[in-house]
Image (cartoon, rainbow, N blue to C red):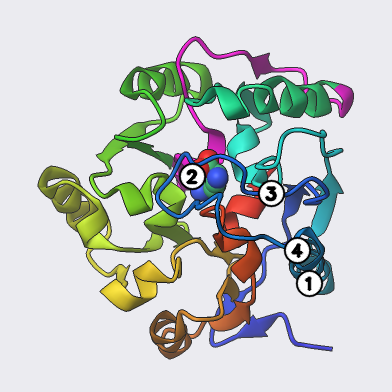
Amino acid sequence: MTSTVSAGRAVVPRRLLMCRPEYFDVNYSINPWMHPEKPTDAGSALVQWEELHGLYRSLGHTVELVEPVPGLPDMVFAANGATVVGGKVLGARFRHRERTAEGPAYLDWFAANGYQDILWPEFINEGEGDYLQVGDLLLAGTGFRTDPRSHLEAQEFFGVPVISLSLVNPNFYHLDTALSVLGPGEVMYYPAAFSPGSQAVLRRLFPDAVLASDQDAAVFGLNAFCDGLNVLLPQAATGLAGQLAERGYRPIGVNLTELLKAGGSVKCCTLEL
Ligand code: ARG
C-alpha cells in the first residue's frame, strides 16, 4: 500500500466523474490532433482508460460513471461535460455540433444524482476543459472553444472571481491542455500557449509556477490531475515528472496514447465533482 503523505504533501481524496470510452473513435476533426484517416483502436482505448480509472480508485478517490452514448465518440472526455464549483453545476454548451448532445447527456447525470443548483448556460463553454478552480479563483480559458461572455456568466452563477486567460496556439485549444492545477496556489503551465497579457497575469498570480518545456507540452504533459500529492500525467512528459518530483510531488506516468489521437489525456477524462 502506498503512503498518502510525503514531504509535507498529502492526498485530498476527490470525487470524480468519468465516462467509459465504449464508442470512442476519431471520425471527425475539431482540433489539430484529430486525424480521422488514421486508424484508432477502441479496444486499446478502453484498456488504457481502465488503467486510469483503476489508478484513481487505488489512490483512494471515488469515481462515478456516466453512461456513454452511442454516436458521441468524444464523450470519454468527461472534463468537458460541466463545471462544478461548491456543489453548483454550470452545464456545458459545445462549440462544435459533433459534441452538442454531450451537454444535456451530462446534465441528466447531475439531475439524477442529487444536484439541485444546475444552470443551462446561455453562452458556449466546454466545462472543466476551460474552467479550472485554483484556491478561491476560477481560471477560465478562451480563444478556441469557450466564449469569453461565458466567463461573466460563470462568475455571476458561482460567485467566485473568474480570471480570463487567452489561449493562442490551436494545439492547446482548452485551458486544461496548457495549465494544470497542483494545489490551492500552485499550478504548472506552458507559457507559449497564452497571449502575452495572459502570460503576465499568470506570472503575477503564480510566480513560483512549474513551467513546462516545449517537449513536455507537445506530449500533452499539462493535461494532468493532481490530488495534492500524486500527479497523474502522460507518461511521455518525463521533464515535467522530474520537476514535480523535485517539489515533493509523486508523478505517475499514464499511457493514454489512444485517446491522444482525439486530442485528450488524463485531465480530459476526468471531471472533478
Ligand atoms: N476531441 C475532443 C475535442 O476536441 C477532445 C477534448 C479534450 N478535452 C479536454 N478537456 N481538453 O473537443
Label 3, secondary structure: give it: loop
Q: Residue at x 82, y 64 (%)?
A: 43
- 83 vs 78, left or right, is left
**From what the image shows, is residue 270 above or below residue 67?**
below
> Which residue lies under the disc numbered 2?
133
Q: Main secondary structure of the magenta part?
A: loop
Q: Earlier in the sequence, mark 2 or mark 1?
A: 1
Mark 2 Cα shell of 10 Å, populated few (<14), some (14-19), many (≥20): many
Mark 4 Cα shell of 10 Å, populated few (<14), some (14-19), many (≥20): many
Label 2, secondary structure: give it: strand
- 77 vs 42, left or right, is left
Q: Amino acid at mark 3?
A: Asp
> Which residue lies under the disc numbered 1?
51
> Which residue lies under the disc numbered 3?
25
Residue closest to the eye, 238 or 86? 238
- Camera-side mark, 3 or 1: 3
Residue closest to the eye, 201 or 196? 196
Q: Amino acid at mark 2?
A: Gln
* Residue 85 seen in render: no
